[in-house]
Image (cartoon, rainbow, N blue to C red):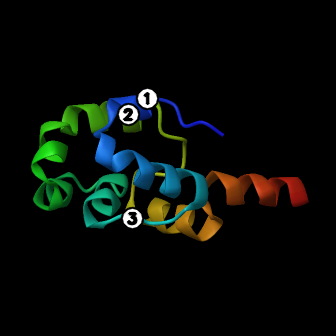
Amino acid sequence: MEIRGLEKLPAHMRDGVERYVLHGIPGGSFMTELFANRLVQAFGRADEENTDAMREWASWLYNDAPGGCWGSPMAVSEWVAAGGLMGRDAKEEAE
């Protein structure tokens, strides 16, 4: 399963995004705050490269990130609990 638009994001973040989106494995504090839609906290935890890429992060979340994986702390918790896209898809197949 391929995640759209990963090339827009800083290279050192792509594996973590892939693990989170596909399997619901949480990333570091920056990524958690970003996916929870907590902009100020995300900026506070971002390294220089991620700070410089915040416009790209916002564009990727809005245009390419799977629905349900971001938007609030609850959305992040539910995504992790579901096991990401792979867990969600497996559950749907079982039902």
Which residue lies at the image location 49% right of the left edge and 68% below the top edge? 77
Q: What is the spatial separation of the Cα atoms under label 2 and label 3, in whole angstroms? A: 18 Å
Q: Residue 11 got which mark?
A: none
Left or right of residue 93: residue 18? left
The reply to whether callout 2 and callout 1 are in contact (CB within 8 Å) is: yes
From this viewpoint, is residue 95 visible? Answer: no
Left or right of residue 52: residue 25? right
Q: Residue 60 got which mark?
A: 2
Please say if 84 is above or below 80. above
Residue 90 at x, y = what percent?
A: 79, 57
Please say if 58 is above or below 15. above
Instruction: Choose top left, top right, bottom left or bottom right for residue 87.
Output: bottom right
Closer mark to the observer between disc 1 and disc 3: 1
The reply to whether callout 1 and callout 3 are in contact (CB within 8 Å) is: no
Residue 16 at x, y = what percent?
A: 41, 55
Image quarter (top left, top right, bottom left or bottom right) of the N terminus: top right
Q: Which residue type does callout 2 highlight?
A: Trp
Q: Which residue is mark 3?
A: 73
Instruction: Choose top left, top right, bottom left or bottom right for residue 86.
Output: bottom right
Q: Which residue type does callout 1 highlight?
A: Asn
Q: Residue 63 got which mark?
A: 1
